[in-house]
């Protein structure tokens, strides 16, 4: 008889403990989940790169991303492309076409900035060796391009204060006039640069009011706030800006 009287009490205590536990999870649970992410870091288990297709996001490895963006760049030029049979065809089509309604970023890759690079000086080309490597790599895939932002002996004006152009670390690739077709072509290059950022020690890619940074590990594109007067050039609407890491401490 004594045991039967204690069962309701035990049940009540059990329900009370469950209620307390649920309350704790409401307040602490989100912090536990957020704590699984490094500051500005990628979500655990997330793919290295992602392409936003009409059927949903498709994850890619870094190597697949390099192949896919290179294939897209060559195919739109009518050139022979690398084998992409192991990659979803929707990915290649998306990289070639861009978003259906308005040109913009549809490809993202995690950032990773190397910290053990040597500081380089400007060469006779007006670029550092790392920046020159980017120029040559672009030429191999995209052919002749309209380039600017550097000159033999270096440049000392025409850009914002502390610009990486003055260090010979930046290149501008022009897509003029500003229209939908040129924006889509610019995004093909911008995506290709992001996919090859680790190999080429790329630090920033800026285009069409958006920027990507190797210093932000989640690899998303972010709104670029252009300085006044916010014209086409300053907003990077008419050119893709790419610069490389400077090297040295930090």
Image (tube, grey):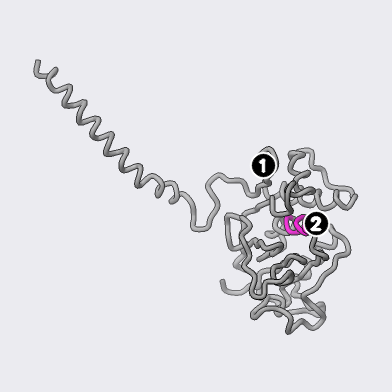
Most foreground residue, 64 or 191: 191
SS for dot 2: helix
**Category of crowding for the residue at label 2, using alpha-carbon neighbours closer than 10 angstroms: few (below 14), some (14–19), many (at least 20):** some
Q: Is residue 17 above or below residue 91?
A: above
**Category of crowding for the residue at label 1, using alpha-carbon neighbours closer than 10 angstroms: few (below 14), some (14–19), many (at least 20):** some
SS for dot 1: strand
Residue at which label 1 appears = 58
Q: Quadrant of residue 194?
A: bottom right
Residue at horizontal 75 percent and vertical 79 percent from the top: 122
Q: Quadrant of residue 26?
A: top left
Q: CA distance from mark 2 to mark 1?
A: 21 Å
User: Farthest top residue?
Assistant: 1
Residue at horizontal 59 percent and vertical 63 percent from the top: 215
For marks 2 and 1 on the same chain, the one whose residue lies earlier in the sequence? 1
Residue 115, how many percent across, how many down? 60, 67
Residue 225, how many percent across, how many down? 62, 67
Segment tinted magenta in the rendering: 183-191
């Amino acid at each position: 008889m004594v045991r039967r009287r204690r069962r309701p009490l035990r049940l009540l205590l059990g329900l009370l403990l469950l209620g307390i536990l649920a309350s704790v999870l409401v307040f602490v649970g989100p912090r536990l989940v957020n704590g699984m992410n490094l500051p500005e870091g990628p979500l655990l288990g997330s793919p290295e790169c992602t392409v936003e297709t009409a059927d949903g996001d498709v994850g890619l490895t870094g190597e697949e991303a390099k192949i896919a963006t290179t294939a897209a760049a060559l195919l739109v030029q009518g050139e022979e492309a690398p084998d992409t049979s192991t990659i979803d065809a929707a990915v290649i089509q998306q990289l070639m076409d861009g978003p259906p309604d308005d040109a913009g970023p549809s490809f993202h890759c995690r950032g990773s900035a190397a910290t053990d690079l040597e500081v380089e000086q400007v060469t006779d080309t007006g670029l550092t060796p790392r920046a020159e490597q980017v120029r040559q790599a672009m030429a191999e895939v995209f052919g002749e391009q309209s380039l600017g932002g550097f000159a033999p002996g270096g440049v000392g004006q025409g850009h914002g204060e502390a610009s990486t152009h003055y260090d010979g670390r930046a290149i501008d690739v022009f897509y003029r006039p500003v229209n939908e077709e040129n924006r889509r072509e610019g995004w093909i290059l911008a995506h290709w640069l992001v996919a090859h950022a680790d190999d080429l020690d790329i630090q920033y890619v800026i285009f069409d009011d958006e920027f990507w940074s190797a210093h932000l590990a989640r690899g998303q594109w972010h709104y670029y706030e252009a300085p006044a007067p916010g014209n086409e050039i300053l907003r990077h609407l008419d050119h893709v800006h790419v610069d490389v890491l400077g090297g040295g401490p930090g």
